[in-house]
Image: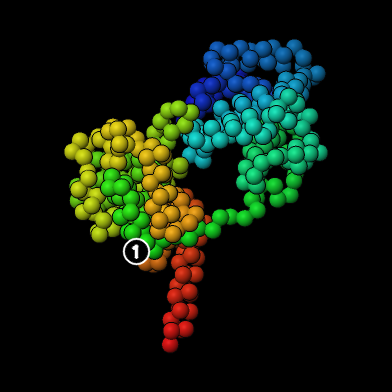
Amino acid sequence: MATRRRNSWGTAKQLPSKRWRASYVGPDGIRYSAATTYTLKADALAWLARERVRVETEGPKWKPPGTVAEAAEKFRDYADRWVDERTNRSGQPLRPRTKSLYQDLLRLHISPTLGELEVSAITSARVRLWHQSLDTGATRRAHAYSLLHAILATAAAEDVIDSNPCKVRGAMATSSARQIEPLTADQLDALAAEMPEPLRVPMLVMGWCGLRVGEMRALLRNDVADDGSTIRVTKAASYRSGEWHCGPPKTKAGIRSVAVPPHIRKALVAILPKDAGALVFPSAQGAEYMTDWQLRRPFAVAVEKLGHKGFRIHDLRHTGATLAAQKGATTAELMRRIGHSTPSMAIRYQHASDARDAELADRLSKGR
C-alpha cells in the first residue's frame, strides 16, 4: 500500500515500488508531479523545495513543471518508470509474470522504434506507422499496442501530453479467440489416469476444482482440510527471471475456499504430507515447486495419446468451470469457485454449458 507524507508545502508519496513521487498544487489549483520518481524521500523533498522557490520567485510568470521537464523526457525512460510504478487492480505491485511481459514488449517491439523519441513527439501518425511495421503475431501485436496505449494514457492524464495519440481502430483486439473444448467428466478422469502417478491428483484438483497451475503449485498441507473436503487458495507460485515467486492470486477474488468433489477426496488425502507447512504437490526433487517441464511434458504426451489435440493445461480450469455450470452453478457461484472478479468469464462457461445441452437435446431428437 502506498504511503503519503505531507509536508508544509507539497506532498511526497511512497509508491508500491518503494520509490517516492513528489507533487504539489500550483498557483492555478492543479496538482503537478515531478518528471521522475526518487529512490530517497530526501530527493523528493528537495524537488519540492526547488519548486517552492520557483513558484515564489516567478510569481505571475510561473509555468507548470510539465511544460519544461516532463515534455522533454524520452519515451524509453518514461515507459520504464511506468512499469516500475504500475499497480494491479488491487493496488499491489505488478506480478513478476506481468512485469516481465511488459518489459519484453517494450524491449522487443516498442522501444526500438519509439524509445528515443520525446514523449511529446509521439504523434498519431508515428503510432500508426509503428503499428503497421510490427513484425510479430496477431496476439503479440495487440498486446504491444495495448501496452503503448496504456502508457500514453497515463502520460495524457499527467499532462505530459495533450491527448493519447493511440487511435488505431481495433488495434487492441486479436483476430480471433482460441476455441476451448473442455473435457467431459470421463475424459478428465481418463487424462488423470494417463499421467505419471505423482501427477494424477494435481490433474484431478485442477480439473475438478478449477485451480490455476500456480495455485496448485503453491498449496500447502494446511491449505487442505484433513478429510480433503475443502482447499483454501491464498497464493500462487510462478517461475520468472531465474527464480520462483510466490504471492497472492491474480485478484482478490482469487483468494477463496473451494469445495472438493467427494469422489476425488480419498485420492487427495492419500498424498497429503504430514508437515503442515509442506507443499502438497512438490517437484520430483522434493521441497521445490513443481516445474513446467515436469508437468507439461507428460501432459502433452497424455493429451496426444487420448486424442485431445490442442488441449492445454490451463484448459483444465475451463473444464472445471464448465462441469460446474453443467450442474447448474449460478454466475455468482462460478465466480466464487473459479476466483473471478467479474462475471464475464462465468457467463462464458454457462453459455458453453447451454450449447452442450442444446447439442444433447438435438441428439436425443435424432435418436427417436
Look at 49% across and 26% down and name the residue there: 3
- Between 354 and 141, the one lying in front of the other is 141
Q: Secondary structure at mark 1?
A: helix
Residue 339 can be seen, yes or no = no
Residue 355 can be seen, yes or no = yes
Which quadrant of the view contains residue 23? Answer: top right
Look at 47% across and 31% down and name the residue there: 240
Look at 45% across and 58% down and name the residue there: 308
Look at 48% across and 56% down and name the residue there: 309
In the image, residue 227 above or below residue 95? below
- Position of residue 156 measured from the top left corner of the image (x, y, whole percent): 71, 35
In the image, residue 41 above or below residue 333? above
Which quadrant of the view contains residue 33? Answer: top right
Asked whether, in this view, residue 230 is left or right of residue 26, the answer is: left
Which quadrant of the view contains residue 19? Answer: top right
In the image, residue 348 above or below residue 285? below
Classed neighbour count for the residue bearing mark 1: other residues with Cα under 10 Å, few (<14), some (14–19), many (≥20): few
Residue assigned mark 1:
186
- Between 309 and 246, the one lying in front of the other is 309
- Position of residue 150 measured from the top left corner of the image (x, y, whole percent): 64, 38
- Between 131 and 125, the one lying in front of the other is 131
Q: Quadrant of the C terminus?
A: bottom left
Q: Amino acid at mark 1?
A: Asp
Asked whether, in this view, residue 193 is left or right of residue 12, the answer is: left
- Position of residue 96 measured from the top left corner of the image (x, y, whole percent): 48, 32
- Between 7 and 178, the one lying in front of the other is 178
